[in-house]
Amino acid sequence: MRLRRQRRGPRSAGERVERLLVMLPWILERGQVRLADMAKQFRLSEKELMDDLMMVSMCGVPPYTPDALIDVRVDEEWVIAEVPNMFRRPLQLTSAEVFVLSAMRDAAMRIPGADRNGPLASALNKLKSLLPKDDVGVTVDLRAVRYLEELRDALDRGAEVKISYFTPSTASRSERNVVPRRILESFGNWYVQGDDSASGEMRTFRIDRIDALDFTGRTVPVIEMDDNDETWFADATEFVTLSVSPKARWIVEQYPYVSREESADGRIVVKMAVTSEHWLGRLLLRAGTEASVVEPAKWSGLGARAARSVLARYGS
């Protein structure tokens, strides 16, 4: 039996917002849909979709009264949406806003689940008539990530692929068979994690470093993987637990983490993989007094040491 599993690791805030821009017109047009059907439409797990819908319910325009908030809610297995008053008002756009929306159209239509014949696409097409009529044209060219769709297909079916992979650190190429288990986007780069035949372990590969890809014809059972499962960090050798204040929330939003706990005052205790002590020191330096090391003890004073090192370098 095919097991339902979440498709990817932690998603960036930018990716979530981009997808919401397509999801909202889709659900508002339909009024209500089953949670499972909407998750399938946008290639999300039901948990991911629920998290995004909770974020939507807090979005709106000033003065943020109930009639100015987006009204999307989940009732048992149904997602229900009602058009808020702010969407009924005629838009008054500046020429710059019209230009930006028109330029973003192609990008929005490439997001998984986007309805290329739906109301959002239709509205954005109408904006083109408002642009100046001259010989100057703007082309938005977003290059598709090579092999991303093939890897997503392999992920969904439990299919094994043979890849040729370039490793920058050794300037070498290797061939190996991989069964994709999770796909992740982070800081503009896409990664695939899977069962690697060469090492016999779970490994992570940057997709743009794959030179060639072919399906081997072999399939294995699809397994369920939690977004924050520590297997995503299988290559990590060390971890750190940080106590982060609300002012340094960007740490949780920008970097993948293993686990997090949030208190009533907004402070977050987060466990993260450490790529190097230097990297962690720079992170703590940026956060200043808004983040502190809970464990391990050897890094409790790392932020201060990093600050002294920077001061010494500049002779202060």
Image (tube, rainbow, N blue to C red):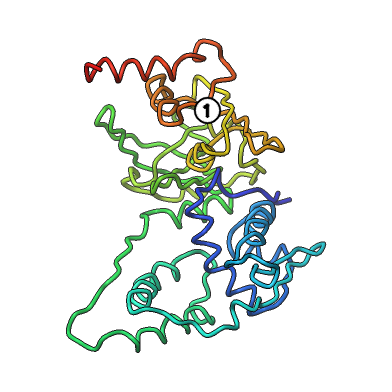
Quarter of the rendering containing residue 28 = bottom right
Q: Which residue is mark 1?
A: 291
Residue sitting at x 38%, y 71%: 106
286 and 251: which one is in front?
286
Q: Is residue 132 above or below residue 279?
A: below
Q: Does residue 201 appear in this view?
A: no
Q: Is residue 199 above or below residue 187?
A: above
Location of residue 143 in the rendering, given as x and y in whole percent from the top left corner: 32, 60
Left or right of 11 in this view: 188:
left
Location of residue 163 in the rendering, given as x and y in whole percent from the top left corner: 39, 43
Q: How many marks?
A: 1
Residue sitting at x 33%, y 63%: 142
Q: Residue furthest right?
A: 76
Q: Secondary structure at mark 1?
A: strand
Left or right of 226 in this view: 286:
left
53 and 95: which one is in front?
95
Identify the amino acid type marked 1.
Ala
